[in-house]
Structure formats: C-alpha cells, structure tokens
Image: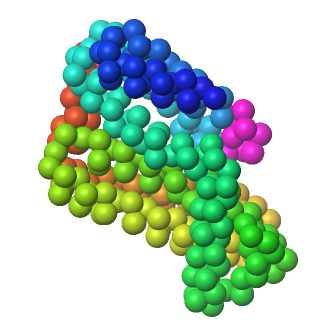
Amino acid sequence: MLIVVSSILMLSFIIFRRRFLGFLAWIFTGFSFLQNVPNFISAQDFFNTTLFSMAFVFFCILAYTSLKGDLDVMLETTRFSLLSITFYFPFALYKPLGDTLISIVTDQTFEIGRLLGFEFERLNWNEIILNDRGVRIILACTGIESISLFAGACLGVKAEISRKLKATLISVPTIYILNLFRNVFVIASCGYHWFGENSFYVAHNVISKLLALISLIIITILVFRELPELEMLIVNLKDEVKRVVR
C-alpha cells in the first residue's frame, strides 16, 4: 500500500532530516489519497471526491515545501501526521481488529437507535435494517479517520503531556459519540424515507458530511484553546506554504 511506503518515508525523514525523504513521503501520501477518488466517483460521493482531490494537491504542495521550506516546521508536521497514520493503521490493515471496531460501533448505533424510539433490527454483525431497508456499517462509519487525525495532532505536538491528554479527551470521545448519532440519523432517514427515494444519499453524502465538517471545525477551535502550540504549528505551516509557493 502507498500509505505504508509514505509512513516509512515519513519516519526516515524524521530520523535523518533529509529534505528529499520528506518530499517523497508527502508525494506518496498524496497518491494514497488520490487512489480513492475513482471509488468515490463511482459511489457519487462528490464531497469526498472533492476533499481527496484537494488533499492530493495539498500534499504535493507540502512535498515541495519539504524541499524549500523551514525544515523544523515540516519535521513537526510530519511527526504528528505519522502518529495519526499509526493510530489508523492497525484498524485498516488488520481485518479482525477493524471488524471488531465495526461490530462495536454497530452494536452501539443499534442501542442508541432503539433508545430513541426507532425500530431498528439487526440483520447481521455489521448491518442494521429499518422498514426493510438496510444500512451496512463499514470502517469509514466508525469515525476512525477523524479520531486518528485528532489523536495524532494532539499527542504529537510539542506541549505538556497534561494539556495534550486533555485536548485528546476533548476531541476523540466527542467525535466518536457524534459519529454514533450520525449513523442513527442515516439509518432512520433511509428507513423512513425522510428525503424521498434518495434518502440515503442526502442523509449520508450531503447532510451528514456538512454537519461533520461544522462539528470538526468547532472541535478544532476547542483543541486550539487547550493547545495553542498546535494552532501555532498550523499557522507556521500555512506561512511556509505561502512563502514557498510564492
């Protein structure tokens, strides 16, 4: 997998501080995102199609910044990015672990839905049905990507461990809980046809993505309040990118 190669290159960049290793690491990271775009296009997921295409361009810019920008800024950015990937890796690459997380999220989604009065039924270990319309929970439905990103960013930045842990506790559980309610909303929308025949698409690909974006922005603001070092790193990275591109 490309992301495995990029992770090895990231680690090499951090250890040996060679700019070309950083360039290669971010290029491979960009292509690891770009390879998902055809799947999003076939699924008519235009939000993720746009997001992952923009991510590819951004990572290519980071690759160039690794060659021409401030080395320390790029090393610290690469450090927390690698930590985020490390959190995500076990669930993505080791199927039994990923399936366990999916099963737990499915169980909790089912229980929350029932508590809210929805007549959810379990079809199997990772699928919930309502009014004969089923929704399958996959790894992306667990919120593990956003959780890994925030965990890596909070724990990877240079700051006191107490504040890093507090920021992690502010972000990670919040994302996990909000994601469970998102799953309930999508299943209920699909089962009750809240948005007509395209209820799943509207609930999953439009409304949920928009609400998730707003939620992550709010969580980011809260994390920045606890970890101004992380905010400063992002600002420095932005300044370096602007300087190098110009």
Q: Determine which quarter of the picture holds residue 231.
A: top left
The picture places residue 196, in percent across and down from the top left corner, at: 76, 68
Rendered view: 88 above or below 2: below
User: For the point 43% across and 62% down, which residue is it?
Assistant: 175
Looking at the image, can residue 223 be seen?
A: yes
For the N terminus, which image quadrant? Answer: top right
* Residue 159 left/right relative to 64: left
Rendered view: 93 above or below 144: above
Q: Main secondary structure of the magenta part?
A: helix
**Magenta residue check for 40:** yes
Rendered view: 2 above or below 183: above
The picture places residue 211, in percent across and down from the top left corner, at: 48, 60
104 or 45: which is nearer to us? 104
The picture places residue 30, in percent across and down from the top left corner, at: 52, 25
Q: Determine which quarter of the picture holds residue 34.
A: top right
138 or 208: which is nearer to us? 138
User: For the point 79% across and 72% down, which residue is it?
Assistant: 124
User: For the point 76% across and 82% down, which residue is it?
Assistant: 121
User: For the point 24% across and 17% down, which residue is it?
Assistant: 71
Q: Residue furthest right?
A: 132
For the C terminus, which image quadrant? Answer: top left
* Residue 10 left/right relative to 235: right
Rendered view: 141 above or below 185: above
The picture places residue 29, in percent across and down from the top left corner, at: 51, 26
Q: Determine which quarter of the picture holds residue 84.
A: top left
Give the colour scheme shown.
rainbow
How many numbered markers are drawn? 0
* Residue 142 left/right relative to 127: left
Looking at the image, can residue 60 be seen?
A: no
83 or 150: which is nearer to us? 83
Magenta part of the protein: which range? 37-45
**Magenta residue check for 202:** no
